[in-house]
Image: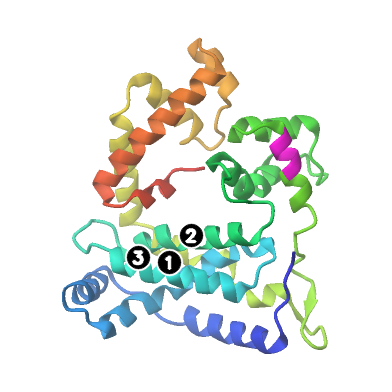
């Protein structure tokens, strides 16, 4: 289901990306001042000044969903909707910066757009299946042996890690296998350009730049505070399943704790509900759950 923009659209995309990436970012006090002016006085000039520098966040996030074969312009448009929603909901009094808060709205907006436009994801899809959809490529790259082909053991590992049936992994792998677009595919009237020419450079991810420093410490403190509200067994499961680089499987954790893997899954689900409530109290928005790995 790959999509190729017209040459005119490709040129417009490149011009838009180039201009957006050249707009300087705001300082913390500038964000606070502009956000307050927009919220308290409905100052549209302040709103424009607040959101425009963070178009680069939209572009950066759009590049992460580029392999789903959808028009980059449409992804950016959906991200812009999320950016404007963030501006409408942002509370300047919170410790978090607007640049960080905006990502909690931009990413879900794009994900919903991707889900709506992929026939493999229908209404009623479970949260676990959505996690599989967006994490299959990442997990496949992490665990495959370099051959580019998943073994049966690899597929079972993915199913266990994401808590979905093996048949779901097989189905999703099959449906997604033909969708990956080579970033070196020629596009344009004479094939003079490549798809990657229209994408932001991942090596200088602006999202990582603007979300560093103070906000990283704030997010860490929020997560640690929320986790501390769990009982010891819940803390163990969350830390080993969600907060470690190589999350343990339900089966391994069950053996360590002397319970079934199904019981581990149940405890994890209950603990995640508690974390959501605790994080929401601190951040003022349930979208803060995006701080936790899927």
For numbered disc 2, what is the local secondary structure? helix
Q: Main secondary structure of the magenta part?
A: helix
In the image, residue 56 lies at what x, y percent? 47, 73
Q: Give the secondary structure at mark 3.
A: helix
| Residue 172, above or below 231 | below
Q: Quadrant of the N terminus?
A: bottom right
Is 185 rendered above or below residue 272?
A: below
Q: Is residue 271 left or right of residue 6?
A: left
Label 1: few (<14), some (14–19) or many (≥20) C-alpha neighbours in 10 Å: many
Q: Is residue 258 magenta?
A: no
The residue drawn where x is 76% and y is 50% is 175
* Earlier sequence position, callout 3 versus callout 2: 3
Q: Position of residue 41 (x, y in %)?
A: 17, 78
| Mark sitting on residue 107 | 2
Spatial CA distance of label 1 from label 3 is: 6 Å
Q: Is residue 205 above or below residue 43?
A: above
Q: Position of residue 125 (x, y in %)?
A: 58, 45
The stretch of residues the image draws in magenta is: 167-171
Q: Which residue is depicted at the point 82% across and 43% down?
A: 149
Magenta-span inclusion, residue 168: yes
Residue 82 numbered mark, or none:
1
- Answer whether labels 2 and 1 touch (C-beta < 8 Å): yes
Q: Are marks 1 and 3 in contact (CB under 8 Å)?
A: yes
Determine the residue located farthest toward the top in the rendered image: 258
On the image, numbered disc 3 is attached to which residue? 86
Q: Quadrant of residue 157?
A: top right
Q: Residue furthest front?
A: 123
**Could you tell me which residue is drawn at 62 percent across and 43 percent down?**
132
Q: CA distance from mark 3 to mark 2?
A: 11 Å
């Amino acid at each position: 289901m790959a999509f190729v923009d017209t040459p005119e659209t490709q040129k417009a995309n490149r011009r838009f990306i180039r201009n957006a990436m050249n707009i300087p970012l705001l300082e913390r006090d500038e964000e606070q001042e502009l956000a307050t002016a927009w919220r308290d006085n409905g100052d549209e000039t302040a709103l424009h000044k607040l959101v425009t520098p963070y178009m680069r966040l939209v572009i950066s996030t759009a590049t992460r969903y580029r392999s789903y074969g959808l028009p980059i312009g449409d992804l950016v448009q959906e991200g812009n909707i999320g950016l404007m929603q963030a501006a409408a909901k942002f509370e300047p009094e919170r410790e978090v910066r607007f640049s960080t808060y905006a990502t909690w709205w931009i990413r879900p907006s794009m994900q919903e757009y991707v889900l709506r436009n992929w026939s493999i994801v229908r209404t009623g899809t479970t949260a676990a299946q959505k996690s599989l959809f967006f994490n299959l490529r990442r997990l496949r790259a992490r665990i495959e042996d370099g051959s580019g082909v998943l073994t049966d053991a690899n597929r079972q590992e993915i199913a266990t890690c994401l808590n979905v049936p093996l048949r779901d992994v097989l189905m999703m792998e099959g449906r997604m296998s033909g969708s990956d677009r080579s970033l070196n595919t020629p596009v344009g009237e004479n094939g003079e350009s490549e798809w990657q020419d229209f994408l932001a450079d991942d090596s200088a991810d602006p999202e990582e730049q603007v979300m560093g420093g103070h906000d990283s410490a704030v997010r860490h403190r929020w997560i640690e505070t929320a986790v501390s509200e769990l009982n010891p067994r819940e803390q163990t499961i969350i830390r080993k399943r969600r907060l470690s680089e190589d999350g343990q499987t339900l089966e391994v954790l069950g053996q360590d704790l002397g319970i079934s893997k199904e019981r581990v899954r149940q405890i994890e689900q209950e603990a995640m509900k508690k974390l959501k409530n605790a994080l929401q109290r601190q951040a003022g928005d349930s979208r803060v759950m995006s701080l936790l790995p899927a």
